[in-house]
């Protein structure tokens, strides 16, 4: 099964004009009075922003209930699909809704979420595999006991994936199901920039978008649904909300917090802005706005990460719980004492590529398709990996204290000889000394799957204002204001995209139009 370019183009609207506004004065961003718009460039019953799983599920559900849908996608066609497209294509599908709610609340311990939102989520979550199967997907279970099996309700959880794993299979299936419906249109390279809101009623009535360097005005007769993902590639927001000076996405670099900004401009409340599925440490090609990933797991074992002070700071091979590690009875984010560098030696360099071929998900593998050299020499020649004959020389090249780096490596080699990492508990099977020159280093950056924060939503997928009241005709789905306040279950964001996309699709189809069809 595949979705052809012909199918994509056949369903994509073309020939957008440029509308004029009559007498609109300078107003607060996002509070454009709809009645003052002389002409609309595009219109639909439901306008969806974003072409990932949340946007597609919203469109499919609304269309199945008779609504015509227009999807505005920021990326060009070749890069469209958000994080869904480059994810592992798996979804969490708990077998029991009551236990799933218990587990969801346990993952949110200390950062509580509304009970009705959790219950709405999991009343639908147990149906998702059935929905996907009906779309035409061959599915299989993935071996898992849940991300946090020790939590109440955590054991016995099941994740599912498309048969064969990864390679965009779920996203392509949803695209095919959406675009074969004549009432769903897509505009690529058309990001939403502002919401159009009736200042008298507070209703959201459309979107100002950009296309070809011009602003266009898009009318939504029933509602707008924001499915624009998180802010993984917005460095200012990363600094403001995540407490890191920088970090880079393993998913779509087009996720820059656009939907968050648009919702804030019309009074939306925010939640979970300090949470993320990450970080872990991975390589980033200098100048690129994405990082390699998933978890760094090279074939060799003679390597460590060193912090700004040239010391180790974590068990490098611990498979984090999407960026969280145990700490004195709780879970915390992996520390980020930047800049962090990978340090290794010649046997490690010869052991194989730092990143394997045929990786079935993440942006670098599925979209950029970078082919890492088998012996790492190409990356050394490009200057991405630095080389030195001594550790002192290497330290100078990466801006670390030479004596501190020598001391750290000596302690590591001693731990390898004793087969005991007393400091961080690394598995002896994953330990090898760093002692044979030349020595190598590469800067590694905090990399993450996605952020979780965004506009607060209720159990009906409505976006709420700062008084916790629904903003009329504005809905959201997916990672834009996800339910995960702290702990995260693998496959849970795809699940949430599908569930709240479905809920949003039902709700917007049931809205009464503020304007009739032309």
Image (cartoon, helix red, strand yellow):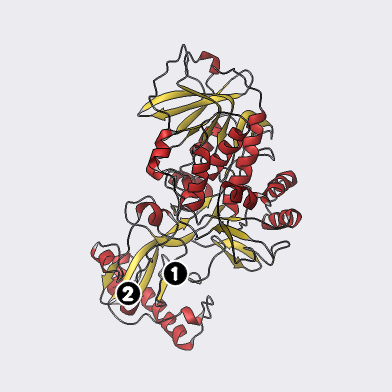
Image spot of residue 366 (x, y percent): 40, 54
Task: State whether residue 29 appears in this view.
Answer: no
Q: Are marks 1 and 2 in contact (CB under 8 Å)?
A: no
Image spot of residue 505 (x, y percent): 62, 36
3 displayed left or right of 140: left
Image quarter for residue 501? top right
281 displayed left or right of 424: left
Label 2 sits on a secondary structure element that is helix
Q: In the displayed orientation, state which residue is furthest to the right.
A: 98
* C-alpha span from label 1 to label 2: 14 Å
Image spot of residue 334 (x, y percent): 53, 62
Query: Which residue is the site of mark 2?
Result: 349
Q: Nearer the viewer, residue 451 or 209?
A: 209
Say few, some or many: other residues with alpha carbon within 10 Å of mark 1 (under 14 / 14 to 19 / 20 or more).
Answer: some
- The structure residue drawn at horizontal position 36% and vertical position 77%, both measured from the top left corner, is 406
Q: In the displayed orientation, state which residue is furthest to the left.
A: 381
Say few, some or many: other residues with alpha carbon within 10 Å of mark 2 (under 14 / 14 to 19 / 20 or more).
Answer: many
- The structure residue drawn at horizontal position 50% and vertical position 58%, both measured from the top left corner, is 279
Label number found at residue 297 = 1
């Amino acid at each position: 099964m595949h979705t052809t370019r012909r199918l994509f183009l056949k369903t994509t609207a073309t020939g957008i004009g440029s509308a004029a506004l009559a007498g609109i004065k300078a107003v607060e961003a996002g509070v454009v009075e709809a009645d003052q718009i002389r002409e609309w460039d595009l219109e639909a019953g439901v306008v969806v922003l974003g072409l990932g799983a949340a946007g597609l599920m919203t469109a499919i559900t609304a269309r199945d209930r008779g609504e015509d849908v227009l999807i505005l996608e920021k990326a060009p066609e070749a890069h469209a699909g958000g994080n869904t497209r480059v994810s592992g294509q798996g979804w969490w599908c708990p077998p029991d809704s009551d236990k799933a709610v218990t587990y969801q609340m346990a993952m949110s311990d200390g950062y509580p979420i509304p009970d009705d939102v959790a219950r709405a989520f999991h009343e639908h979550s147990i149906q998702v595999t059935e929905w996907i199967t009906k779309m035409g997907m061959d599915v299989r279970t993935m071996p898992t006991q849940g991300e946090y099996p020790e939590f109440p309700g955590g054991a016995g959880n099941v994740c599912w994936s498309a048969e064969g794993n990864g390679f965009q299979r779920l996203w392509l299936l949803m695209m095919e199901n959406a675009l074969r419906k004549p009432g769903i249109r897509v505009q690529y390279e058309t990001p939403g920039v502002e919401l159009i809101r009736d200042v008298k009623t507070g209703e959201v009535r459309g979107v100002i978008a950009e296309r070809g360097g011009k602003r266009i005005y898009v009318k939504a007769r029933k509602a707008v649904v924001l499915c624009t993902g998180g802010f993984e590639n917005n460095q200012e927001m990363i600094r403001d909300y995540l407490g890191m000076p920088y970090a880079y996405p393993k998913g779509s670099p087009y996720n820059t917090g656009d939907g968050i900004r648009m919702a804030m401009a019309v009074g939306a409340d925010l939640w979970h802005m300090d949470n993320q599925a990450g970080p872990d440490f991975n390589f980033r090609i200098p100048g690129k706005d994405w990082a390699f990933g998933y978890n760094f797991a090279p074939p060799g074992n003679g390597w460590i990460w060193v912090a700004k002070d040239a010391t180790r700071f974590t068990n490098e091979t611990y498979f984090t719980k999407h960026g969280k590690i145990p700490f004195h009875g709780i879970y915390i984010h992996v520390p980020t004492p930047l800049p962090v560098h990978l340090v290794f030696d010649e046997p490690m360099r010869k052991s194989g590529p730092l990143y394997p071929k045929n990786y079935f998900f993440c942006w670098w593998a599925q979209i950029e398709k970078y082919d890492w050299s088998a012996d790492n020499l190409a990356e050394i020649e490009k200057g991405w990996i630095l080389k030195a004959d001594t550790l002192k020389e290497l330290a100078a090249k990466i801006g670390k204290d030479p004596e501190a780096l020598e001391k750290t490596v000596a302690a590591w080699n001693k731990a390898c000889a004793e087969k005991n990492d007393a400091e961080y508990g690394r598995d002896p099977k994953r330990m090898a000394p760093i002692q044979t020159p030349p020595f190598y280093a590469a800067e590694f950056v905090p990399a993450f799957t996605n952020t979780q924060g965004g506009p607060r939503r209720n159990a009906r997928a409505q976006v709420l204002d700062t008084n916790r009241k629904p903003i009329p005709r504005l809905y959201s789905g997916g990672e834009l204001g996800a339910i995960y306040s702290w702990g995260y279950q693998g496959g849970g964001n795809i699940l949430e995209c599908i569930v709240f996309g479905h809920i949003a699709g039902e709700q917007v189809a049931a809205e009464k139009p503020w304007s009739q069809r032309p």
